[in-house]
Image (tube, grey):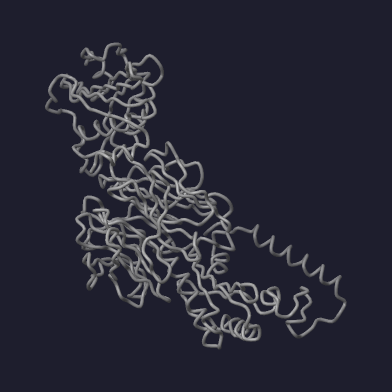
Amino acid sequence: MRRIPTAPIKLIAIMLVAGFAVTGCASKKPLPNNPGELGLNNAAPGTSQDFTVNVGDRIFFDTDSSAIRADAQQTLARQAQWLNQYPNYSITIEGHADERGTREYNIALGARRAAATRDFLAARGVNQARIRTISYGKERPVATCDDISCWSQNRRAVTQLGGPGS
Amino acid sequence: MRKPTLRLIAFVTMAMTAFALGGQPARALVEIDINKGNIEPLPIAITDFISSDGIGAQISGVVAADLQSSGLFAPIGKGAFIEKVSNPDVAPRFEDWRVINAQALVIGRVIEEGDGRLRAEFRLWDTFAGEQMLGEQFFTNRDNWRRVAHIIADTIYQRLTGEKGYFDTRVVFVSESGPKDRRVKKLAIMDQDGANVRYLTRGDDIVLTPRFSPTRQEITYMDFAGGEPKVYLLQLETGQRELVGDFPGMTFSPRFSPDGQQVIMSLQQGGNANIYSMDLRTRRTTRLTNSNAIDTSPSFSPDGSRIVFESDRGGRQQLYVMGAGGGEPQRISFGNGSYSTPVWSPRGDLIAFTKQSGGQFSIGVMRPDGSGERILTTGFHNEGPTWAPNGRVLMFFREAAGSGGPQLFTIDLTGRNERAIRTPEFGSDPAWSPLLE
């Protein structure tokens, strides 16, 4: 029905292949089981790179929903554990919506998703005083095609780390 | 109170005075019944206004473009003209105009006065009755020639349709550039026809949903400049920006009351958004809704007595109407789909909205009691209607699938005469000004 944009998908595939090729050369070790030792990066434990790559900085939502899905609960549980281990970090949770909604409502929907994410982390012991939220509505998509494959990536909450002690 | 407003709106010193140019307005034989379902555009001949340089033809060209854009007039190509008007003070040869089926004829002259100002005069003739319908002259600075043209077009529109015109107006909107994931958004203002675009912000921060004050040279809008996105006021003359209220959280979706003394907006509270008003004189804030839902996009009725807004309190976004002071809202939208961004018509008779249904986004109108829903346009993405001050035309933004960005469009109340408004960059979130005075 709709035009299927292929360019972004191709691009992602090429980047992944390239990434694996580089790490394949850099590391001859057998594949590790612990995600922290995946070797895709040199992320030292407790760094923001460690958080992004090994914990996962974002969760995704169903259409017009702010319910934390089962897959997102796992990610947020890891985030909470990590944040409790490194209590110097303050965080900003960015709530986002896809572009298949009207502007004002999506601003509120992004805020609702950020609030749901904050509440989940707080329930797992992360001090609310460390958490700030902001909504970008539909104004900052990460995937920019005009079909469902992109919209599902844009319905997200991203946990951004402030610097230690920030 | 209106006099200083005029000066501010114009941005340049101007004095514009209308004088009747001899003759009584004749009983009109030529008239357009704007309420008829299917209007045949009125054939009208608009001659190049006589002047010593090109300014006369420029002004009459804008008059013709305005009238044509309304869909109610069909300017006749100048190549068909038989009589060459050389003296606008003598009656034209009506038979020369009747034979090319020009039911109305506009002639004019633009003269540079001793003080450098322009004097623009025009006459509107009913060619079949052989009578003058209008004769007026205006004085202005040369810089304002487009405004003179819009005012002449409004005068002709009003004489022939019986409705006030909307050509001497401006539109504030969001000008968008750059890739979608790093889109730069600037507030911009332009004439209703897309001319004279001027940027009001530099694009450093995301800006959204600008709305005109009905009484002052001021807009209210949402800006991400601070740590938290908030509603601001922006003075158009000075560029001065001011935060609206001291709310504990994000504020968004602002709009003025009809008297310009209040701003209504949403305040985010956890996962919910409620509607608040703030009196701009006393700074007093009032909470108008209290629900576990997203209540947003409030818009006053033109008499200031009621507010329409959208809420997902029933599960999906629907339209509700409540009193201006709050109270129990009545749901008014019951069609198949979700409804959002309601805007009350300046005439009070209709509410325009965005409707999402079957994966499509439409612009539609319904009466304030929810009856008489009509969809004006449907497609991949249409959003955010705003009314021309005469309540006959809507502007909105559209993004076609794969187009890369949104564009501004107008459509009239009957769903006909859809037109793109060209802007230098992508355009969204238009808001139409009142008629300039």
Towards the viewer: B132 or A123:
A123
Judge left or right: residue A103 versus residue B121.
Answer: right
Which quadrant of the structure image shows residue B275?
bottom left
- On the image, the x and y values in percent for residue B352 come to 30, 56
In the image, residue A15 sits, relative to residue B239, either above or below, namely below
In the image, residue B357 sits, relative to residue A158, either above or below, namely above
Towards the viewer: B77 or B294:
B294
Judge left or right: residue B87 versus residue B354.
Answer: left
In the image, residue B121 sits, relative to residue A95, either above or below, namely above
- On the image, the x and y values in percent for residue B342 come to 32, 60
Count of numbered circles in the view: 0
Q: Which residue shows up at 31% across the image and 23% down it?
A: B46
Q: Which residue shows up at 24% across the image and 32% down it?
A: B155
Towards the viewer: A143 or B346:
B346
- On the image, the x and y values in percent for residue B113 come to 32, 17
In the image, residue B131 sits, relative to residue B373, either above or below, namely above
- On the image, the x and y values in percent for residue A31 come to 81, 81
Which quadrant of the structure image shows residue A157?
bottom right
Q: Residue furthest front?
A: B282
Image quarter hosting the C terminus of chain A? bottom right
Which quadrant of the structure image shows residue B392?
top left
Towards the viewer: B177 or B421:
B177
Q: Which residue shows up at 55% across the image and 74% down it?
A: A60
